[in-house]
Image (cartoon, rainbow, N blue to C red):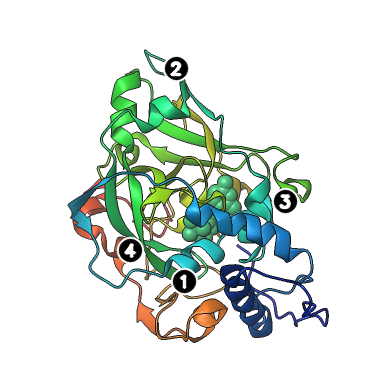
Amino acid sequence: MLIPSPKWLRGDDIAASEITPRHVFAARRRLLALAAAGTAGAALSPWLTREARAQQGRHGPKLAATPNNAYVVTEKRTPYEDVTTYNNFYEFGTDKSDPARNAGTLRPRPWQVAVEGLVKKPKVYDLDELVKLAPMEERVYRLRCVEGWSMVIPWLGYPLSELIRRVEPQPGAKYVQFITLADKKQMPGISSSVLDWPYSEGLRMDEAMHPLALLTFGLYGEVLPNQNGAPVRVVLPWKYGFKSAKSIVKIRFVDRQPPTSWNLAAPQEYGFYSNVNPDVDHPRWSQATERRIGEDSGGGGFAALFAPKRKTLPFNGYGQQVASLYQGMDLRKFF
Ligand SMILES: Nc1nc2c(c(=O)[nH]1)N[C@H]1C(S)=C(S)[C@@H](COP(=O)(O)O)O[C@H]1N2
Ligand SMILES: [Mo]
């Protein structure tokens, strides 16, 4: 990931004559705060219309789900506003505020996900069919970005294993690869070569079958906002955030460890496993602590800068559930 570089708020403020809905205005003030804090620096004027569009996601379709209390972190939930305006989604730009501003052009419907490769029942799923495949659950997970910040988010989804069981993997299927949308017309960030597109991620089969691995369609009671990976993503709470691929179009079962975008971009910095591990530092920074976005920070974009540090937990706090997957492995080597 890029380290946020200091940038300064540019002068072009918003004309007072612009008539702005209240909630859009509030969101813009948060973005101004972000820019002032040096974590966002683009010109402000083009934000309004796109942001207004992004904000409408908030009033978008609800998604019904049953809370699964076995998977609820009791820590304070990160405010919706932060969850949906402080994002990494490089297909829409590399600043944290870019996805919320730019992802209005993503068309999450109609949508299909091709499940293919070493399975007995390959199938191209229509989104509606995929949504109905298994009972929708609400699970509150920690998400820890490799950059050193974290959130607590109520996701809506069902175990990825539900889908995997149905396509019947062949014995040779050892890994699962997630390939996400790469469409220049919908995604302005694709024109940058910061990553090899399409964004690709992967899991070992036993990781993919783990009950924590969530095929995710929503958050906070509604369908995924575009900036959070609409219409379908994975959430893998014991791994760094970049493993949780957004806007998935292909799930491929393979016999070998698949290439992954961040590992290709910087192999010495981002390994295939990427389990959250406070004892293995990133070559350029420590992973021992993190800042919880939205916590005691006065809110808004200052969150990442001023939230108090907290200790990062092995496997992001999910060690009891997942440590056995890695028994006997040298986690410094397989980072
Ligand atoms: N397709 C795609 N998926 C992605 C990314 C991305 O750039 N493109 N960024 C990852 C990173 S680095 C993080 S931390 C999480 C952030 O998810 P969130 O914005 O919903 O919190 O998405 C991950 N999934
Ligand atoms: Mo991340």
User: Could you say which disc has been placed on residue 189 in the image?
Assistant: 3
Q: Is residue 313 above or below residue 256?
A: below
Q: CA distance from mark 4 to mark 3?
A: 29 Å
Q: Secondary structure at mark 1?
A: strand
N-term-proximal mark, 4 vs 2? 2
Given the image, on which type of amino acid does mark 1 rest?
Trp
N-term-proximal mark, 2 vs 3? 2
* Front-lying residue, 129 or 211: 129
Q: Are marks 2 and 1 in contact (CB under 8 Å)?
A: no
Estimate the x, y position of residue 297 in percent, counting from the top left: 46, 85
Given the image, on which type of amino acid does mark 4 rest?
Asn
Residue 267 visible to the viewer: no
Q: CA distance from mark 3 to mark 1?
A: 23 Å
- The residue carrying pointer 3 sits among few (fewer than 14), some (14 to 19) or many (20 or more) residues within 10 Å by Cα, namely many
Return the residue at label 2. 123
Given the image, on which type of amino acid does mark 2 rest?
Lys
On screen, residue 250 versus residue 78, left or right, reads right
Res 220 quadrant in image: bottom left
- The residue carrying pointer 4 sits among few (fewer than 14), some (14 to 19) or many (20 or more) residues within 10 Å by Cα, namely many
Given the image, on which type of amino acid does mark 3 rest?
Gly
Q: Secondary structure at mark 4?
A: helix
Q: CA distance from mark 4 to mark 2?
A: 33 Å
Q: Are marks 4 and 2 in contact (CB under 8 Å)?
A: no
Res 313 quadrant in image: bottom left
- The residue carrying pointer 2 sits among few (fewer than 14), some (14 to 19) or many (20 or more) residues within 10 Å by Cα, namely some
Return the residue at label 1. 149
Estimate the x, y position of residue 15 in percent, counting from the top left: 80, 78
Quadrant of the rendering where the N terminus is positioned: bottom right
Return the residue at label 4. 316
Quadrant of the rendering where the C terminus is positioned: bottom left
Q: Residue at coordinates 82% horizontally, 83% vertically from top-left? A: 11
Residue 333 visible to the viewer: yes
